[in-house]
Amino acid sequence: MRRLALAFGLLVLATLPFWVGNSYYTNIASQILLYAVFALGLNVLVGYAGLVSLGHAGLFGIAAYTGALLINSGAGHLLAILGALGVTLLAAAAFAMLSLRGTGLGFVMITVALGQIVWGVAYRWISITNGDNGVSIATRPAPFGLTLATAPGFYWASLVVFLVSLGAIAVFAASPFGISLRGTRDQPRRMNALGYHVWMIRFLAFLFSGLWSGVAGMLFLYYNQFVSPQSVALTSSAEVLLMVIAGGTGTLLGPFAGAALVVIMKNVASAYIERWNFVLGAIFVAIVIFMPEGLVPGSLRFWRWTLTRLRPRRPAAVATPVRAPLPNREGGA
Amino acid sequence: MTALEVQGLDKSFGGLRVTAAVDLAVAPGERHLIIGPNGAGKTTLFNLITGELKPDRGSVRLFERDITRVPSRRRAHLGLARTYQIITLFPGETLMHNIVLSLLGLSRLRWSPVEIAMALAQNPKVLLLDEPFAGLSIDERRDVQQLLAAIPRDVTIVMIEHDMDVALDFAERITVLHFGEVVVEGTRAEVVAHPRTREIYLGE
């Protein structure tokens, strides 16, 4: 059942450009995938480490700016991508060193400040970043001779990156390291007493999270062939955090669902309603009230609830057990 | 040779002196009990031994090695394990789940042995138990007592308890802590017979 759903989902995603038949919608799907990668990366911190960052657009932007500047100075795409990711990792290390001095609100505030420093540099250091006008690049890469200049081409490339990130984060979350990371989220004191280096575990998780933010930043750069301070701003950090929370923190498919919700609202609903932000806000409020755990775990809960309500009415149903099974916490999808 | 040795351990929180020049020596394989009324500084002493708190003065030695400045996670690797006194609900479980568990009487019964098992899983040389009997019924206490009796002698055990009667059978040597000071120290018979012990426990 689960595998069937997964295979069906993959089939739908892989053939999407054929059945939407329109490059506008294919491009929206590409945007969903690139923001899903961004949200997946942030979810490593928010969901698995319990550390809420509001500065990840800074890392996203550092990757995009570094990539753009490298390409414009004549570097090849491979070098630009590797350079951008390297610089992002260094920046993530610096971010982590500073922000991991605190947890909880302190951590949030330091990440806000760091993100705003990146924004300030992008906005004010005009000789390098071109200020508010942003930086453009001329071409998208053509890996293995496949062009990414068309909407379907770029979509498939994004899909590959998204699937790789999803797989990597799934392996990460199930690994002993991922389990110890969740341990530091729930019981940092006990983890320390058990002999775990809590700070180092969080630091490495921050780097991993930053790496995927950088990957998403490069996708963003190639998608728009342009980057400006707007994509580094605090609202951008808040947007991706909302994707994670709306979709479901600490789940694998939650960030994707959150990204889909926000991107679709932004692009599709804004065509019909001028105040689309208002609608998005109302949706978030509804999610918080009816599915505080997020869209993906919340929908699963409603699905199971519906199933259990339907079952006893069937004639062949087994008698209800004396003690109902204890409600489990809704786990990851 | 001592498995665990504490010398002149001082810790103050602001003006409150929680432990005052505490000395403690535990031989390898010994079952040592630390008793004292609530607020005597027992758990603080554990936190100082594991390194979760830094002492103002004094030293902690594990098998003659000075570990006073060793970070607590490293102490765990050196063979020091502890349990926590569980007074929290189950984090991450639903409210209903917690209530059902309490109604079924599962919370403590299941939890205290789990605490001990978690600590034993680290294969410790010195095991610190923080009130493993707190809140248990008489039957459950017997289960935990049997569990403790089954721990091999190459594990040295130090246990905190504020109710002396519960853990008396277990103890070979006892330290009585009162207002952060060691009041009486000795074998079980010596401590039980000591007038100061009676004074603290019976208010005579």
Image: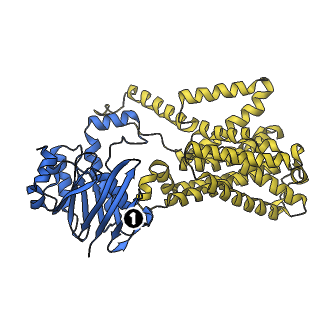
- Give the x, y percent position of residue B34: 23, 56
Q: Nearer the viewer, residue A231 or B96?
A: A231
Q: Quadrant of residue A232?
A: top right
Residue drawn where x is 67% and y is 57% of the image: A94
Q: Nearer the viewer, residue A139 or A178?
A: A178
When the figure is inspected, residue A79 is found, relative to residue A150, above or below; the finding is below
What chain is tagged by disc 1?
A: B
- Give the x, y percent position of residue B12: 38, 52
Q: Quadrant of residue B182?
A: bottom left
State which chain is coloured blue.
B
When the figure is inspected, residue A232 is found, relative to residue A277, above or below; the finding is below
Q: Amino acid at mark 1?
A: Ala
When the figure is inspected, residue A42 is found, relative to residue B51, above or below; the finding is above
Q: Is residue A102 visible in the rendered structure shown here?
A: yes
Q: How many marks on residues?
A: 1
Residue drawn where x is 22% and y is 47% of the image: B37
Question: According to the image, what is the colour scheme of the structure?
Answer: by chain
Colour given to chain A in the rendered image: yellow
Q: Nearer the viewer, residue A113 or A172?
A: A113
- Give the x, y percent position of residue A192: 44, 58
Q: Is residue A265 left or right of residue A150?
A: left
Q: Quadrant of residue B121?
A: bottom left
Q: Is residue A157 left or right of residue A202?
A: right
- Residue under pointer 1: B76
Q: Pick out the residue farthest to the front.
A: B15
- Give the x, y percent position of residue A265: 72, 31
